[in-house]
Amino acid sequence: MYPSIYHRTTLLLVLSTACSAAIADDTTLRALDERITQLEQRAAPTSSANAFNPAISLILGGTYARLGVDPTIPATGFAMSANPGHQQGFNIGESELGISANIDPQFSGFATMALSPAGGVSVENAFIQSNALGSGVNLKIGRYFSGLGYLNDVHAHAWDFVDQPLVYATLWNNQLGEDGLQLKWLAPTDRFFELGGEIGRGRGFPGSDTNRNGAGDAVLFAHLGDDIGVEHSWRIGASLHETQRQNAISTGVPDLLASVGGVSNSFTGNSRTTGLDMVWKYSPNGNVADRYIKFQSEYFQRKESGTLSYNLLTNSSYSDTQTGWYAQSVAQFMPHWRMGLRYDRLNPGTATVGAANTANVISNYGFQPTRTSWMLDYSPSEFSRLRLQLARDHSRQTLPENQIFLQYVMSMGAHGAHSY
Amino acid sequence: MKKLLFIAMLLISSSSHAAINVFACEPEWAALTQILAGDLANIYTATGALQDPHQVQARPSLIAKARNAQLLVCTGAELEIGWMPVVLRESANPAIAVGADGNFSAAKYVTMREVPGRLDRADGDVHAMGNPHIQTDARNFLPIADALSKRLAQIDPSHAAQYQQRHTAFEQQWRTAIAKWEQLAAPLKGVPIVVQHKGFPYLNAWLGLNEVAELEPKPGMEPSASHLSEVLNELHSHPARMVIRAAYQDARPSDWISQRAHIQAVALPFTVGGTPQASDLYTMFDDTIARLLGGLKQP
């Protein structure tokens, strides 16, 4: 309870009228005021075991997906990437438990446990963050989503679509998770300008989680953003990710010999990804509670070069440049109702393959995976959302499909604040 | 040597003249800070009068401005809970962290109304610390100005005397203004009203308005057609004189009731800038009362 001036004044008035008028001089009043404050403090509980409990939030989410093609088939030309795919039928893939609190004046802590549909819990995020470094410096240590791009550190419950864009699915296995440390610096300028760097274990794809003393991967990113009047705001960014891949094994990779079910390949080499991202938001009068439009687009390019071991037997050099981008727009056309449209496109590139493997490895698929998704969602309150998503997926050559998703995302407990 | 000394003195004097950077969450606190600090403060206002202050996004511009602020002046009481935690975390500025001298919450200095007896989101978007729309009662500005003036002096001690002087002047003028407003608003005492959002308990308590119904079925939930019909039915047996809403809110639910119940729909500025007339704190209350008095007339 906060000391309330009105309560105190009323008390003072009662006291001062009850006593003789002579005591109503300033010093006496001040002394009385002090005594009331002390009494108030005494009345308040000074300690209790659960008063320091962290903020807890539980996200309950689930999806029903109706798919036309086996979701384990990867996008054409990206068989050597991770393929998070979709879950068919009913599943509770998006449920997660979040815990956060200040640890002491210097640090705060955050943890997110994802509830796996098969049972069991996995640690999605578990990191500490500095509170008091000052000068615009933020340090994060632990397991966190990398700050690259725009969507990478957005949790699944805050996504505008049921799934991540294809470029995130294929190049980052949906989201790049890091075990490491992140240092960010916000420039002391009027316009938002932020620089960030990360080094980590390289746990998440495309890193190879191996034991070593050094860092498994490194990330650099920069963001610039501002408002234009009260109705428009924007942010642009650039990112760079580098990792050394070691014996990265991909299974089921199609080859020129057309082995049934594909072959297993292993790649060792350098992987460098650059990215550009932008987001622009518009809201009449800046009142986002009423209506708004959000437009965002991201582009990533990954260059890999090293040695490919075809079928884990034949080694030769391999290099490829893959690219992908998406553009999407979400509009809240009336309070609580939003509609969104997204277009995805990937380019598997043309690989340069060493002589030993030219007869084995497909260097050019001559196909660019695409997908168009449309969604409509309704949020009865800030804490609940129901969504319908329809998609025309042509990310697998000769296997176009129509997808239907129904999703709910609900949150209970602590009121979370969302980033831009 | 003399030249050097002169430059040094110039530097010292210019640094003591440097205005402090204030990040005001809502326009009413920017206006109050302006009155209490004048040129001594460089004020940035984070939200506009036509924005719902519950739902603001932690935009890059807000983070950049918070990074350089020495003082944050906000309503508090969890009004800004949906965006301020991100702004504070991302701006990495310990001067304005929760608990620091540079973090000023106006709600700490007034008696909160509608503090819920139970916390359950089945009751809508309830605020655990009470209704945060404290700026609609002019009397609340007295204790807040007192505390804010002291806080300014604490952060910028070299100008303490000026802050005190400005505060004394404000207090006098404000008390006179309150007396004038209360006199003007006398016809409003006991007048039954309908509100669109539960945003006016402080105004009601001050001017004696009698809130008989709300258009939002639960705080923060959109007025549904069925709920509006219920309100309309109730108004047949317990008529109200007007339906009021904040300037940032959608006019449609108020207009719907206004047409069917044959009462005036009144949009109040709610904060500085909410209406063209409400250009500062004084005119905000001038206009609020003028509009309420206008609402007494039959449409």
Image (cartoon, coloured by chain):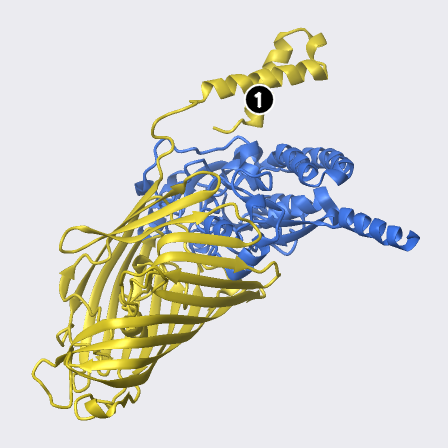
Chain colours: A yellow, B blue
**Where residue A200 appears, x then y in whole percent?**
36, 60
Drawn side of residue B14 relative to residue A161, left or right? right
The residue most toward the front is: A213
In this rendering, position of residue B259 left or right of residue B64 = left
Outermost residue to the right: B2
Observer-nearest residue: A252 or A63? Answer: A252
Residue at point 50% right, 21% down?
A: A41
Looking at the image, is B191 positioned above or below residue A187?
above
* Residue drawn at x 45%, y 38% as measured from the top left: A104
x%, y% of residue B28? 61, 46
The location of residue B63, given as percent across then percent down, is 53, 56
Q: Amino acid at mark 1?
A: Arg
Residue A123: give x, y in percent of width and height. Answer: 26, 52
In the rendered structure, the residue with mark 1 lies on which chain?
A
Residue A71 at least partly seen: yes
Residue located beneath label 1 in the image: A8
Q: Nearer the viewer, residue A276 or A274?
A: A274
Picture layout, residue B140 above or below residue A392: above
Camera-side residue: A238 or A342? A238
The secondary structure type at the circle numbered 1 is helix
A292 up-or-down from B235: above or below:
below
Camera-nearest residue between A223 and A104: A104
Q: Quadrant of residue B259?
A: bottom left
Mark 1 Cα-neighbour bin, 10 Å: few <14, some 14–19, many ≥20: some
Could you tell me how many numbered marks the image carries?
A: 1
Residue A395 visible from this viewpoint: no
